[in-house]
Every structure is written in structure tokens, then in C-alpha cells.
Amino acid sequence: MSGYASVDADIDAWIDRHQLVLFSSSGGEECRSAFLSSDGGDTFQIWVDLPTDENVTVGLAWINGPIERPTAPEPKWIVPTAEISFALERAMAEALALMAPQGAIFLHGRSSNDARAAAQPRPAAHRRRRDDRRRRLH
């Protein structure tokens, strides 16, 4: 049985809700993580540590990008396993806020503006630029 069994259903629901790609192993070790990138080239990782006792830690890290970000402690949320959905949503909101000035969000394996667009309408000028860019690419 997975060490993540107590939180897997909540993680899967969050992954589906945001149309993310779940990574469940890294270097032969079991893990739970997802990556988000922006048009500006920043990449963030949201991960879940193995639950301990009745708590679980959700973390957010800047992985890379065109402009070096100041070194700061990586945000982590330690919550009871029953509240993991809250911590995942908080990590997602934090990542989206850091990417907000940069445009579209790429959910590794898919491209989507849905996550931020649902929370904040885009100005018409931005929609036109995006549509013009699509026409040039096709």
C-alpha cells in the first residue's frame, strides 16, 4: 500500500480540477508533485511530502526561470491530512500570483489559461494579442 494512501484521493481530485500532470515517482522513489510554467519562462513545483502521523506537508518551489529570484525560504503548509485540499489550493494560488504578471500558465503536458482566467478576467487587449499570436502560429 502507498505511503500516500491517506491523501491520494484528495491529490487526484486537485490534479483533475486544475488539469495538471501528476508525477508519482522520482529517482525510483515514490513522490507526489506537479509543475507549472509561465509564458515568461518561470517554472514552479508543488509537491506533497509523505504524510507523517496525521499531518502532511505541501510545498512550493521556484525551479528555474529567465530572471533569478531572490533566495527565500520555500513556502510550506503543514496541515492535518484531512485539510490537504486547502494546502494544495493555497500553494496553487501562491504560484499563480507569482506568475500573474507573465501571462499564460503551462501545466506540464498541457497549456491552459483556465486556472487564472477563472479567477480574474483578462483585458480585451490581452485577448487580442493572444489571438493574433495563435493566427501567426497556425
Image: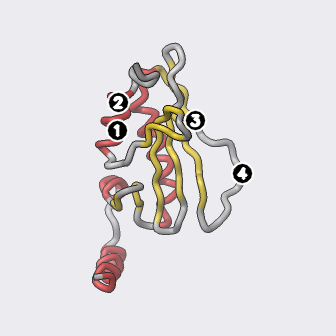
Which of marks 2 and 3 precedes in the sequence?
2
Residue 70 locus on image (x, y percent): 70, 55
Label 3: which residue?
A: 76
Residues at marks 3 and 4, CA–CA distance in whole angstroms: 15 Å
Which of marks 2 and 4 precedes in the sequence?
2
Whether tag 1 and tag 2 are in contact, CB under 8 A, the answer is: yes
Whether tag 1 and tag 3 are in contact, CB under 8 A, the answer is: no
Residues at marks 3 and 2, CA–CA distance in whole angstroms: 18 Å
Identify the image's colour scheme: rainbow, by chain, secondary structure or one colour. secondary structure
As drawn, 73 above or below 112: above
Residue 97 locus on image (x, y percent): 49, 54
Which of marks 4 and 1 precedes in the sequence?
1
Whether tag 4 and tag 2 are in contact, CB under 8 A, the answer is: no
Residue depicted at x 30% and y 35%: 13
Label 2: which residue?
A: 10
Residue 97 left/right relative to 132? right
Residue depicted at x 68% and y 42%: 73
Looking at the image, which residue sits at the far front?
28
Q: Amino acid at mark 4?
A: Thr
Which of marks 4 and 3 precedes in the sequence?
4
Residue 11 left/right relative to 32? left
> What element does badge 4 sit on?
loop
